[in-house]
Image (tube, helix red, strand yellow):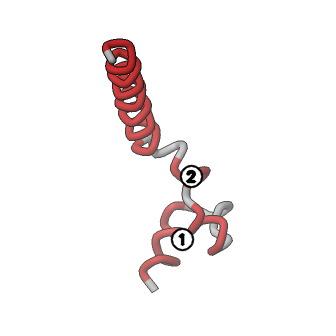
Amino acid sequence: MKRFERILVKLIVIQFIVLICTQLLIQQSAIQPYLSRVVQYEGVNKITITEWLETFSQ
């Protein structure tokens, strides 16, 4: 049982580290266009940020 608990704790720690890294990655503004499917659906991946915001405000 101790071995199982150690493995479980290690998995939880790894999951927490991956969660933190992913959250930090999502907050990077340079990466957001690659992660957002809305950009792909709307077809706004080659316009300026102002035009992009106007697309979502309509």
4 on left or right of 32: left
Residue at coordinates 44% horizontally, 38% vertically from top-left? 22
Q: Nearer the viewer, residue 7 or 26?
A: 7
> Which quarter of the picture shows residue 6?
top left
Identify the element where label 1 is drawn.
Answer: helix
What count of labels does the image hold? Answer: 2
Q: Nearer the viewer, residue 33 or 4?
A: 4
Q: Is residue 20 above or below residue 42?
A: above
- Count residues near mark 2 (Cα–Cα under 10 Å), then give few for <14, some for 14-19, many for 20+: few
Say whether marks 1 and 2 touch (CB < 8 Å). no
Q: Nearer the viewer, residue 4 or 28?
A: 4
Q: Which mark is residue 51?
A: 1
* Image x and y of residue 19, in percent: 39, 36
Q: Where's the N terminus, which quadrant?
A: top left
Identify the element where label 2 is drawn.
Answer: helix
Q: As shown in the figure, which amino acid type bears the numbered disc 2?
A: Leu
* Image x and y of residue 28, in percent: 44, 41
- Count residues near mark 1 (Cα–Cα under 10 Å), then give few for <14, some for 14-19, many for 20+: few
Q: Is residue 23 above or below residue 52?
A: above
* Image x and y of residue 43, in percent: 68, 71
Gap in angstroms between the C-alphas marked 1 and 2: 19 Å
* Image x and y of residue 18, in percent: 44, 31
Q: As shown in the figure, which amino acid type bears the numbered disc 1?
A: Glu
Q: Is residue 6 above or below residue 27?
A: above
Q: Is residue 55 above or below residue 38?
A: below
Task: Kindly identify which residue carries mark 2.
Answer: 35
51 on left or right of 44: left
Q: Between tags 1 and 2, which lies in front?
A: 2
